[in-house]
Image (spheres, rainbow, N blue to C red):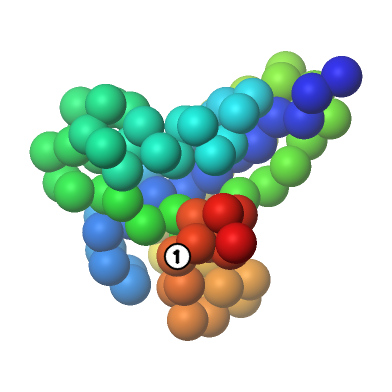
Amino acid sequence: MRRAYVYIMTNKPMGILYIGVTADLPARIFAHRSGTGSDFCKKWNLTRLIHAEPFDRIDEAIVREKALKRWKRGWKLRLISEINPQWADLFEILNA
């Protein structure tokens, strides 16, 4: 069974956040980066993948995505900063 992912995109450290879910992380991030992933990401130029959580099943990933979307912004910023303190673009690591 394919893995699923919850991911967070931004435009810069501490910038605008977009939370999504996908079964194909590299393809989805490529779509965001090329401007076809979502209107929100395109509008705000959210091309930097800063967080990704793998799940064995898509339904589990969807539950996590909905929970993260309900979080306060400060909680999201802390989650990202604890796991990715440099707010590095993880897409570069995925394609290395």
Q: Is residue 83 above or below residue 40?
A: below
Residue 5 horizontal/vertical position (percent)? 65, 36
In this picture, residue 66 sits left or right of residue 11: right
For the N terminus, the quadrant is top right
Residue in view at x 33 percent, y 37 percent: 32
Q: In the rendered image of this protein, does residue 10 appear above or below residue 5?
A: below
Q: Label 1: which residue?
A: 89
Please tell me whether mark 1 sits on a helix, a strand or a loop: loop
Q: Is residue 28 left or right of residue 43?
A: right
Q: Position of residue 28 (x, y in %)?
A: 47, 32
Q: Residues within 10 Å of mark 1 (few under 14, many from 20)?
A: some
Q: Which is nearer the eye, 38 or 33?
A: 33
**Coordinates of residue 14 in the picture (x, y in percent):** 32, 70
Residue found at x 58% / y 36%: 25
- Which amino acid type corresponds to the residue marked 1 in the rendered image? Asp
Residue drawn at x 71%, y 21% is 58
Frontmost residue, 2 versus 67: 2
Identified at 70% across, 29% down, the residue is 4
Q: Is residue 38 visible?
A: yes
Please determine whether, in this image, residue 72 is positioned above or below residue 82.
above
**How far across and how far down the image is residue 31, in percent?**
36, 32
Residue 76: in sight, yes or no?
Answer: no
Screen quadrant of the C terminus: bottom right
Quarter of the view holding residue 30: top left
Quadrant hosting residue 62: top right
Q: In the image, is 26 to the left or to the right of 74?
A: right
